[in-house]
Image (tube, helix red, strand yellow):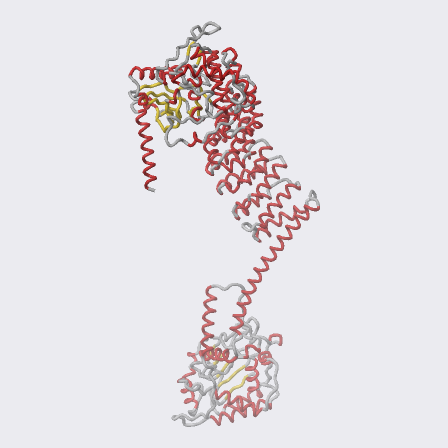
Amino acid sequence: MESMLNKLKSTVTKVTADVTSAVMGNPVTREFDVGRHIASGGNGLAWKIFNGTKKSTKQEVAVFVFDKKLIDKYQKFEKDQIIDSLKRGVQQLTRLRHPRLLTVQHPLEESRDCLAFCTEPVFASLSNVLGNWDNLPSPLPSDIKEYKLYDVETKYGLLQVSEGLSFLHSSVKMIHGNLSPENIILNKSGAWKIMGFDFCIQSINPSEQEPKYSCKEWDPNLPSLCLPNPEYLAPEYILAVSCETASDMYSLGAVMYAVFNNGKPVFEVNKQDIYKSFSRQLDQLSRLGANNLQNIPEEVCEHIKLLLNVAPAVRPDADQMTKIPFFDDVGAMTLQYFDSLFQRDNLQKSQFFKGLPKVLPKLPKRVIVQRILPCLTSEFVNPDMVPFVLPNVLLIAEECTKEEYVKLILPDLSPVFKQQEPIQILLIFLQKMDLLLTKTPADEIKNSVLPMVYRALEAPSIQIQELCLNIIPTFANLIDYPSMKNSLIPRIKNACLQTSSLAVRVNSLVCLGKILEYLDKWFVLDDILPFLQQIPSKEPAVLMGVLGIYKCTFSHKKLGITKEQLAGKVLPHLIPLSIENNLNLNQFNSFISVIKEMLSRLEAEHKIKLEQIHIMQEQQKSLDINQMNMPEEKKGSNTGNQIDKVFTNLGTDILTSGSDCKENGLVTNQRKGSLTLEEKQKLAKEQEQAQKLKSQQPLKPQTHTITAPVKQTKDLTDTLRENMASLTNQSVNKTKVSSSSSFSSVGIGMGFPSPVESTKRNGLNANIGFQSSGFGMGIGTTSQNFFGNTGVTGMANMNMLPAANMTPYSPMSTTSAVSQPTQQSRPPDMSALDSLFGPQKPKMSMNQLSQQKTNQWLNQFVPPQGTNNSALGTQMNVMGQPGFGLQGNPFFNPQNFTQPANSMTTSSSASNDLKDLFG
């Protein structure tokens, strides 16, 4: 790797040194930058040719440099002769101006070390191309080494040289005197140009019709650079010391021979014995046969023999050579026409450009790019010619690589993209849009091609609008989204709405349908679909275009239409369109098929949503029902705990809970739909409470004998049992139940108000009171419903108030309390009890029932095992004292009983038990 870098460094250093030493100090370097060494030319290939550019204009040039070191071996006078000969040739070339002569851009400049002048850009000399590589850089440039002349290049090159000689002979009255491959230069475009006028001979009588030329005798003692190339020199120069225009024609024949024989001349000349060589040459020329001309094309073989004829009078002149059939080739004539294009008017040019596409495929690519393309692009400055030139330029672009297109064609096309007149320019570009998009860089597409497309959509020509709409989908993926959304789509919509052409409207819809995949879903839903409803036309083609856009949007995976859009906008638009009278059966079926597909998806999506909502509701409902349908013992303990909170100070429970709610059909209001945050928090607390209750062991009453407290002076248990038994017997013997009953032994009275209608059996509208001389308790109001379907579980409006009409508790009050209803003037209506407690159920025997209820009631005063209930203990102690009554009980202070926060419920079983107990 290091060796390669060193080699490259040395090569670059050597080239730089050669260039520097060649032109250092020459005035040419003041105005021109000298580049690399590319070729050699001139007499003896003594001139080195370099690339160069003009500093002020950056114009490309060729710099010819003659290094004086080449003649250091000569004596001073010989050096001077050589320098004078070189100067004479360049000065004569500078004065002459013709398309077939090399154009000088800067005259000859001399410095101490070199001679230099500048010309038009040059590729190489014909001698270099034919294989003579003297005075060329090392390594040899690959473009020269691999360069091969095409037939059309050879034909037209020789034709150009002939035209150049014709100009010199006819117009300038001059003989070139040294026409050879060394003095024929191929410029950058491939044109053959004549240079090397070192030995030119001017006519001595230019004003006369028959010019005369004086010729110098051959001096073999002069340096080779002071003599013309004898291998291409006519025999009369040496043998007769005479010359004329025919002498140049001999040289032309020798050049033509060399071109078809890879640079080999007709004869090899011994410069040491020039006269003897030319004497033998005369004999060979007189016997020139087919063997010597076997490599020459047949159609020009005879003309070359004439040019190489010994007699100058036989040789054709330059003007005659330009008209031989060999040069009547289509390619050569085409190139010749391009060279004279500036002389033609627009009509002639237009006719020529129309036929050019038929000729271009027959020409080599290098010839087209080097010779034809520059001539075509130069016509872009003429707007009238652009529609005729542009198809040919784009045809050439198809054969170019992307790099060649960007380098050679695109710079000239960019200004044409912006031309709006004539309108045919836009049409031609649209027809070749695939080519432009394939080879044009993305940034140039955005800056030049897309604005042209936008103008085409707004063009007045329907044909251009249709063509533009057809080609837009082919490059839609190359358009950035903002440009498509803000520039392209609005113009397509305007073209659809404002045009009077059905074809443009349909093509607009088709174009939109094809570029939907490059658009955003919400842009399509919010902008494209509403636009379809604005189209006023109802022709079948338009309707099918609308249907196509709906279908593409509906079925595309990236896009899709929401069910809200389907139900609210799409289907209400499509269904009326489907029954348009202009539609045929197939079109109607297409509409119905899409509508059914949309309806099916709408049904499926909405059904899934509703099923999900239903599942959520069912889950919520099951959660609430699980709270309602807890195991009976858990609900009983839960409800018991709530009642215990109400009767904490009372120390007794009269009502039971559990299965009562279920029997009376008590149902809690269930919330529908989603829950609020507060409801979710409440639900979480209820779940947490239910979990705690579930983890607790249920409280089970224990049956054991109640022992008398230490301070108890009298046991009232037996008395209570006897009084309860007698109370039961009395209630059975009576035909009607009194409206109020009391327990004389405990001083508790429960009263039932007036009856209610049988239709209100589901609700409790009566007041239940526990009456004594110390307090009274009422449950509910007439407006409350405790057992209805919409009622709220629990006890509401529980009031414990003193009752003034209740007598103090005493053992003797039992009889009077029970017999009180019989003493009233009007028996009370007991329908309220029926509506409260529901239908009767079969009863036990009265003794069994009395004994069972008494045991249940007493068991409530026995605390569970391990429970430290001071209130119940105190109550039991008080109950054991004589004269026990509610007024004397400190726990039954009316002020201690306010409306409780918790509610209490009773079930039908509890009501039946109470009814059985109290009659």
Instruction: Using the image as rendered, state which of residue 68 and residue 480 is in the foreground.
Output: 68
Q: Say left or right for 585 vs 185.
A: right
Q: Position of residue 449 (x, y in %)?
A: 50, 35
Q: Position of residue 671 (x, y in %)?
A: 53, 66
Q: Say left or right for 868 vs 471.
A: left
Residue 52 visible, this angle: no
Instruction: Using the image as rendered, state which of residue 831 and residue 128 is in the foreground.
Output: 128
Examine the rendered structure and indicate whether residue 607 appears above or below residue 358: below
Q: Say left or right for 873 vs 740.
A: left
Instruction: Using the image as rendered, state which of residue 744 and residue 867 is in the foreground.
Output: 867
Q: Position of residue 273 (x, y in %)?
A: 40, 16
Residue 63 visible, this angle: yes
The answer to which quarter of the image holds residue 9 is top left
* Quadrant, the C terminus: bottom right
Instruction: Using the image as rendered, state which of residue 280 and residue 707 is in the foreground.
Output: 280
Examine the rendered structure and indicate whether residue 697 appears above or below residue 359: below
Marks counted in the figure total 0
Examine the rendered structure and indicate whether residue 192 appears above or below residue 636: above
* Quadrant, the N terminus: top left
Q: Position of residue 536 (x, y in %)?
A: 62, 40
Instruction: Name the residue: 48% across, 42% down.
Output: 482
